[in-house]
Amino acid sequence: MTFLHKRVREGDASFGSDLRDLRELRGISFEEACRATKIDAHILKAFEEDRLEELEDPIFVGRHLTAYVKYLGGYEPYFRMRYESRLSAVSSKRKTEDLLPRVRKIGFFDLFAAPQFLAFLGIVAFAALLGGYVLWQAHAVSTSPPLAVERPRDGEILDVPRVDVHGTTIAEATVTVNGRDAPVSPQGAFTIELDVPRGTSIITIISRRRRGSETRVVRHVTYERELPELDVLGDISTTGTTSGTTSATSTSVSTTSRR
């Protein structure tokens, strides 16, 4: 058992001085005691300097006192009794509101620990990226694809019963010309040939996104076939000559008969 040799002083001996003398008797520094017991320095300082009124929860802190005395090799019941006696004396001097839990203002960032705050930022960033992607997809689906028809020109006159349809659009679009699929190159160009009847024909070119809107262009073309030329005067002359010859022959036959 450890005995403390203390000087006789006027009044009661200090609770904190007994703890400090015991630590110094063991040859342990204050910093070493804090590291070994893992007790906060301000709590140990409040013990050794007998400033128990600064402790927010003296009853809970009493557990730290028991661990500290055990570390120093002191007599636990003795120090526990001194602590409770000193605590009673301090509590009788404190106001009732001082015994209630202290209210501390909490800032906004106090609600977030570092890992949780980083996780929160990650979730916000992911939600922002996801929202941006959804908006981009919605815009892409709702926007009509570009379509430029280079041939034929609207109102073009054809001299053959065929028409070449050529134009450009986006590579991922599908193109139909009068209901027929036109292949689209990786550069977005398309070409197709159609047969047209005589007269005016309507060429409808449609460029459609795979999952979205479409763009439509209409062209009018006319195929005029030339009619063969007829030699009307020659036919009339030939007919007249034939008729005259027939009449002359008939007259000759009639005269011979009379004779």
Image: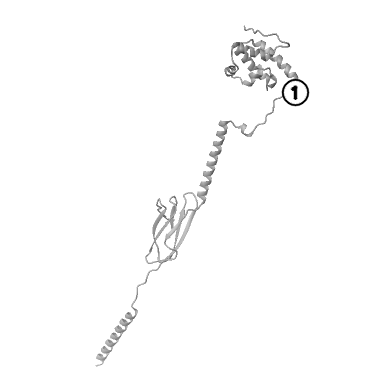
Question: How many discs appear?
Answer: 1
Position of residue 6 measured from the top left corner of the image (x, y, whole percent): 67, 9
Q: Residue 21 vs residue 182: left or right?
A: right
Q: Residue 171 vs residue 97: left or right?
A: left
Q: How is the image coloured?
A: one colour
Q: Is residue 151 above or below residue 226?
A: above
Q: Residue 86 vs residue 156: left or right?
A: right
Position of residue 28 measured from the top left corner of the image (x, y, whole percent): 59, 14
Position of residue 236 measured from the top left corner of the image (x, y, whole percent): 33, 81
| Residue 159: quadrant of the picture | bottom left
Front-most of residues 33 and 61: 33
- Quadrant where the N terminus sits is top right
Q: Is residue 102 above or below residue 215?
A: above
Badge 1 is on which residue?
96
Q: Amino acid at mark 1?
A: Thr
* SS under mark 1: helix
- Quadrant where the C terminus sits is bottom left
| Residue 105: quadrant of the picture | top right
Q: Residue at x 41, y 54 (%)?
A: 189
Position of residue 75 measured from the top left corner of the image (x, y, whole percent): 64, 10
Q: Residue at x 73, y 19 (%)?
A: 91
Q: Residues within 10 Å of mark 1 (few under 14, many from 20)?
A: few
Q: Residue at x 75, y 19 (%)?
A: 93
Q: Is residue 44 above or below residue 222?
A: above
Front-most of residues 62 and 94: 94
| Residue 191: quadrant of the picture | bottom left
Q: Residue at x 28, y 88 (%)?
A: 248
